[in-house]
């Protein structure tokens, strides 16, 4: 895997996104409208929403945002373009460029989502640094998992149902760990209390990245 190829593919992803800014603008509109609808639905007043509900609702919103953003990873790649990439790059470079790009996009969307969520729904977070770190780790986890699943579903005709089915077994333990760490951040507990969960999150991310490195070449050649 050559770093020059990886950087070139990453630049290509950024240029395509910049030329089609409507997709990113649509995601931002989705974030704002979803949070605002939640605000209207709960009719928030001071202390009207419990911390567990506030925490779980944020991660559910972010999960749907990540799924929507990443589901198009391979959808916009035509068969002719994929055939062209086949002769230029290794499959490992293809999948890792998309994972890195999606991680950047989901992290940015997650931070914007958090900022607007705090503005509209209130801020119960005692340790914002731990919460943001957890958010970035979760964004990498969502990106690595859903990008690989998106590549699989692309070979099956871009079925969104199949993407949800394949991604759920990996996303669920990841989501539970993220909710637990963010609850510790909300309660202001020491970072040492979240150390085990953060290590598990890191291990899950490494396992998914290793699976992507090993399995995607076989998927790409098919």
Image: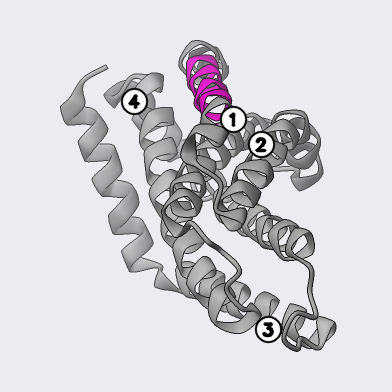
Residue 125, placed above or below residue 43: above
Name the residue carrying label 4.
93
**Camera-side residue of 175 and 16:** 175
Answer whether labels 4 and 1 touch (C-beta < 8 Å): no
Q: Check residue 36 in the rendering and tell me which mark sits there, or answer none.
A: 3
Span shown in magenta: 198-211
Residue 8, placed above or below residue 210: below
Q: Secondary structure at mark 2?
A: helix
How packed mark 3 is, by other alpha carbons closer than 10 Å (few <14, some 14-19, many 20 or more), is: some
Name the residue carrying label 1.
197
**Where does the image place residue 168, in percent across and percent down from the top left?**
77, 36
Q: Secondary structure at mark 1?
A: helix
Answer whether labels 2 and 4 touch (C-beta < 8 Å): no
Q: Secondary structure at mark 3?
A: helix
Earlier along the polypeptide chain: callout 2 or callout 4?
4
**Gap between marks 2 and 3, in whole Å?**
26 Å
Answer whether labels 1 and 2 touch (C-beta < 8 Å): yes
How packed mark 4 is, by other alpha carbons closer than 10 Å (few <14, some 14-19, many 20 or more), is: many
Name the residue carrying label 2.
177
**Gap between marks 4 and 3, in whole Å?**
39 Å
How packed mark 2 is, by other alpha carbons closer than 10 Å (few <14, some 14-19, many 20 or more), is: some
Answer whether labels 4 and 3 touch (C-beta < 8 Å): no
């Amino acid at each position: 895997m050559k770093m020059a190829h990886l950087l070139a593919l990453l630049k290509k992803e950024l240029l395509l996104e910049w030329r089609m800014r409507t997709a990113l603008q649509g995601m931002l509109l989705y974030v704002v409208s979803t949070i605002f609808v939640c605000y209207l639905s709960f009719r928030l007043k001071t202390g009207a929403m419990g911390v567990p509900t506030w925490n779980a609702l944020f991660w559910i919103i972010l999960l749907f945002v990540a799924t929507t953003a990443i589901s198009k990873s391979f959808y916009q790649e035509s068969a002719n373009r994929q055939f062209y990439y086949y002769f230029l790059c290794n499959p490992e470079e293809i999948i890792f460029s998309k994972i890195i790009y999606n991680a950047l996009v989901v992290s940015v969307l997650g931070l914007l989502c958090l900022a607007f969520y705090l503005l509209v729904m209130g801020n119960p977070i005692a340790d914002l640094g731990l919460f943001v770190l957890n958010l970035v780790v979760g964004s990498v986890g969502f990106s690595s998992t859903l990008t690989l699943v998106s590549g699989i579903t692309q070979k099956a005709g871009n079925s969104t149902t199949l993407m949800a089915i394949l991604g759920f077994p990996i996303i669920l333990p990841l989501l539970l760990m993220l909710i637990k760490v963010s609850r510790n951040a909300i309660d202001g507990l020491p970072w040492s209390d979240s150390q085990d969960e953060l290590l598990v999150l890191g291990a899950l991310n490494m396992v998914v990245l290793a699976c992507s490195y090993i399995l995607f070449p076989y998927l790409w050649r098919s």
